[in-house]
Amino acid sequence: MKLEASPTGFFGEFGGAYVPEMLYPNVKELQERYLEIIHDATFECEFQSLLRDFAGRPTPLFRAATLSRLHGCEILLKREDLLHTGAHKINNTIGQILLAKRLGKTRIIAETGAGQHGVATATVCALMGIPCIVYMGEVDMQRQALNVGRMRLLGAEVRSVTSGSKTLKDATNEAMRDWIANPHDTHYIIGSVVGPHPFPDMVARFQSVISAEIKEQCQAAYASLPTHVIACVGGGSNAMGGFFHFIEEPSVELIGVEAAGCGVSSGRSAATIALGRNGILHGSRTLFMQTADGQVEEAHSISAGLDYPGIGPQHAHLHTVGRVTYVQATDAEALSGAKTLARREGIIPALETAHAVAHLSKMSFKPTDKVVLVVSGRGDKDMGTYLEAFGGRISDDN
Amino acid sequence: MTTNRFEQLPAQRALSVFFTAGHPRRDDTLTVLKLLQESEVNFVEIGFPFSDPIADGPTIQASNHTALANGMTLERLFDQLATLRTGEITLPVLLMGYLNPVEQFGRERFFESAARLGVDGLILPDMPFDEYLSTYKPLYQKHKIQPVFLVTSRTDEARIRAFDAERPAFLYVLSSDAVTGGKALVTTEREAFFQRLAGMKLTSRLIVGFGVSDRESFNAVTKHTAGAIVGSAFVRALNGASQGASQHRSDPQALRSLVNDFITQVR
């Protein structure tokens, strides 16, 4: 299958641009110009050179020997955790800051959950000398205090959001309100494949470098495509990036791992695909967790980056047509996944990534399988949670 | 059987008030509506709450959350409005809210319920105009409910004329680039915008909203337009009715004096 946005930004029944009139001119300007801008040769050249020299691309595709032995197949880790700022988020923020400059915007706003997108935005704003305001839920500011400090050191203003669940959903609302109030000079760098068209398509294109490299690296090492690509899914940007160039390769099994929190049916989860219904949130038609009355439900995940009640419209579509299989991992399973990767491979992953790692042990593989797991980010930001969760057991041998 | 209730509006200085159903108490909706009619308000928008009102400022956001915490739902709102047109309410009534609750309730069912109860107009700020034309317009027409479109200083002329051609109840002219409850544009910019609109000779009424809070702002924005909507300032005033007569109703006397005092200060 092909995954292409319709002229009005739909992927099947999902997507579109459900914005109030105040945002219509901004969104329309982006819709009309994003493809022309990102296909421009100078843009492409500047984008690629910053990805290489500033962010540190290409990232390695590392053969995880111990995990490979454990699972009886080739496990290959796509090391987005090695990128500058510690996660895949910078691929998108580099693309969007270059786009914002071409649109003549002089002020940047962003929302952030775990703080990784906020840090990646603050970083490119510092690089370009553009003022940056990051909206972050009060709850997330507490659990990701280190990233708040990083953003501030980079010169960004971090604004605490105290409405609703005080997490990513509410930070997104507040960023949209800022954009409504500052439509002339401001570009909103959305951090995931969510929001009104063209954001989901644009962010997917900027993140697609992940699967472009996987394809090339796999060809070079094995002269074949991978058999599986596994990635965690919150809004779904690292997964979209990891899947992008394989969507039209039917032999590659694509698996998205959502956060089940305390369990899919516990009432405390962020398992959007499992629990969501079709509706309109943050400017697009997609699947999200909501009450019978259409009120958005609060998500829960131990990982702030997956703690979002919705999912990007491409994922909603890929699920509906059956191209991607979406599965869930609980908080406890993710913690155990993080420990596994740390102990077996010497890599402390972000809690988001840990959900994808956790899913490996629920699968069975053939010896010929080449399974790519996208390590979306590193675990430094989550050390507080890890220490608290493992407590005295952090020195256990297993 | 229905006449177009918007025809009864005065040509100038029409005053409309917005409030959120379920705020401050769950079952205040009809009481507030009656008090607004007594105070000679010309028409009313009843907001139905949504958890994530992205076009609204802190005051209306808070009223949405209070309403939801009070147990307000669309189902309940339609129950409350069952007697809307059986009593003395004659002024035009619009419902206003975000698209998702409407879609979950069921589009057809929503329009059918609203029309049956005598609702005159429906404002859905996050409904794309394309989707109005493809999906919602037939429902508005079938149920004789009038749409309303938002116009900002950045809406281009062709788009404004396209809105006008749909014969909306009115064009909802935004006096500011902000969410609800914000400050109005500086006078010179706003005047130029309103004069540009007036010069377009549109068939629709121009009604100004966002940033209208008192007599001064009401007088200023209605100089070149047909009227104005007061939202956040009224919702904030209603916060004063915190003493309840019962668990789900504010004290009617407290509400009455709040509403009367507020409207007197605007008109």
Image (cartoon, coloured by chain):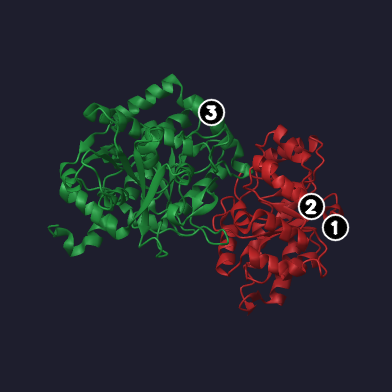
Chain colours: A green, B red
**Alpha-carbon distance for marks 1 and 2?**
9 Å
In this picture, residue B22 sits left or right of residue A204: right
The residue that disc 3 covers is A33
Q: Position of residue A275 (x, y in %)?
A: 46, 57
- Look at label 1 and name its amino acid: Thr
Q: Does mark 2 fall on the same chain as mark 1?
A: yes
In this picture, residue A191 sits left or right of residue A185: left
| Residue at the spot 37% in from the left edge and 38% down from the top edge | A243
In this picture, residue A106 sits left or right of residue B253: left
Q: Quadrant of residue B155?
A: top right
Q: In this picture, is A249 found above or below A67?
A: above
The residue that disc 1 covers is B2
Which element carries disc 1, helix, strand or loop? loop
Q: Position of residue A384 (x, y in %)?
A: 26, 56
Most extreme residue toward the bottom, as rendered? B246
**Alpha-carbon distance for marks 2 and 3?**
39 Å
Residue contact at pointers 3 and 1, CB within 8 angstroms: no
Q: Quadrant of residue A218?
A: top left
Q: Residues within 10 Å of mark 2 (few under 14, many from 20)?
A: some
Q: Quadrant of the C terminus of chain B?
A: bottom right
| Residue at the spot 67% in from the left edge and 41% down from the top edge | B129
Residue contact at pointers 1 and 2, CB within 8 angstroms: yes
The residue that disc 2 covers is B144
Q: Nearer the viewer, residue B11 or A369?
A: A369
Which element carries disc 3, helix, strand or loop? helix
Q: In this picture, is B33 found above or below A232?
A: below
- Look at label 2 and name its amino acid: Lys
Q: Nearer the viewer, residue B24 or B223?
A: B24
Q: Position of residue B68 (x, y in %)?
A: 57, 65
